[in-house]
Amino acid sequence: MTDTGSAPEVLGARLGPSGAGRWLKCSLAPQLEKAQPHTDTQWAAEGTLMHEIAEWGWNCALHRLDAKQQQSKEAALREESSKAGYPTAELFAAAALWRNAVRGIHSAYFTDWAYLEPEASVDLSQLYPTMRGKIDLAGLFISERGPEILVSDLKGGTGVPVKAYNNPQLKLYAFGVAMDLSMLHEVEDHTPVHLQIAQPRVDDGISTWSTTVGELVAWVETEVRPAIAAAISDPKANPGAWCQFCDAGGVCRARADVAGMAIDLDAEQLSPEEVAEWLARAPVVQGFLKRLRERAQSDILAGREIPGWELSRTQGRRKITDEDAAADRLTAAGYRQSQFSQRKLLGVTALDALVGGKQVLADTLGDALGKTDGFLKLSPGDTGMANLLENMFPDEEF
């Protein structure tokens, strides 16, 4: 048994709806993740903007903005998206497709809903003191059967579709929404609850799965509460496909053990059943190695040594920093615009060929030619690797 201290202070937000797919399977995950930084990716930033666009769309549809507010907010969102290089039209289209998917649940007129709230706050503190979050859309409408509840989650991913069927994150949010709405509406055990995931940027990206309030309550009592208790008082590692997005991948001993087992295998000697088993474990191994590299980079940047490894910056690439100035200077140097521009300035490599080499281009463009920073690359240092090999193989010469 591991002493975890006071639960709220120790586990914090790591024990929340967004990680439910993990900690319901691996009770050690919140313990390990709490000490690890969470880094958002470019795709996460794009997804955040898409959600802002979607929220603006809902506020327009629900008549919460006047015409001037709608236009000014839309202009600001389009400008932000354009500056970031995001597919602006695609993001706005995704938000509209999501609204249409919600219309398919009940009515084309959102005013027909008894309750409809984008970015709805959900309080789950009855399960764990700090457990709360926001669901992209929560709603309640009255049908011939009585009240029916909807929770809908907008996903911006363009890869593998995420499905609503038995989705633990959505189920937790749905439970919280149902408990909140039960204080204002006649919500019973038999009340239908519709879980929807809208992922408009993939084919077949709209999925809906229905359950009842009673089934959600039973699931919380038989699976969620025991998992929370285990995470607090007796956490145990259980590596599996749910490890893929775990922030503790670089420090998890269980994942390291699985990866170590994989290294010792000869794929040609495995039976078909073993191949199937290891294919299922592949995300654990791949995710562990990815997180391991991220952890090593983070440690080195923080001044901690990783024996035999160093962090160096790759060579940056040249780029035109001021296209107008570059075009003016190429023109002044005697080149015709048709030679160096095809609606936009040619790339650096093509300009090198045009003017006769890198140095000629540098002399011609001056400060209109710059260089990006290279990206960080984890690689074995010359001295460090020699020492590492010597320690691993003391009888060999290097």
Image (spheres, rainbow, N blue to C red):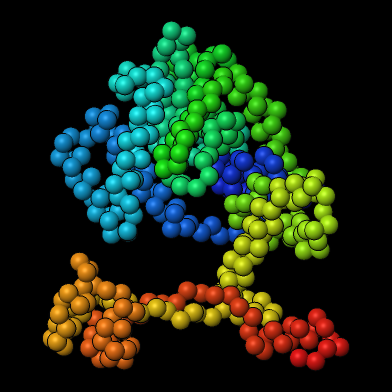
Q: Write the residue at 58% across / 34% down.
A: 167
Which of the pair 252/92 is nearer the observer? 92
**On the rendered structure, is 79 left or right of 241?**
left
Query: Which corner quadrant of the image does residue 300 belong to?
Result: bottom right
Which quadrant of the structure image shows residue 305? bottom right
Residue 341 visible to the viewer:
yes
Residue 85 at what x, y percent from top left?
32, 58
Residue located at (20% from left, 77% from top)? 339
Q: Quadrant of residue 397?
A: bottom right
Residue 130 seen from this side? no
Outermost residue to the top: 144
Residue 121 position in % (x across, y down): 44, 35
Along the horizontal axis of the image, is 136 left or right of 164? left
* Foreground pick, 28 / 166: 166
243 shown above or below 375: above
Residue 234 x, y percent position in the rendering: 76, 45
Q: Does 330 sit above or below residue 39?
A: below
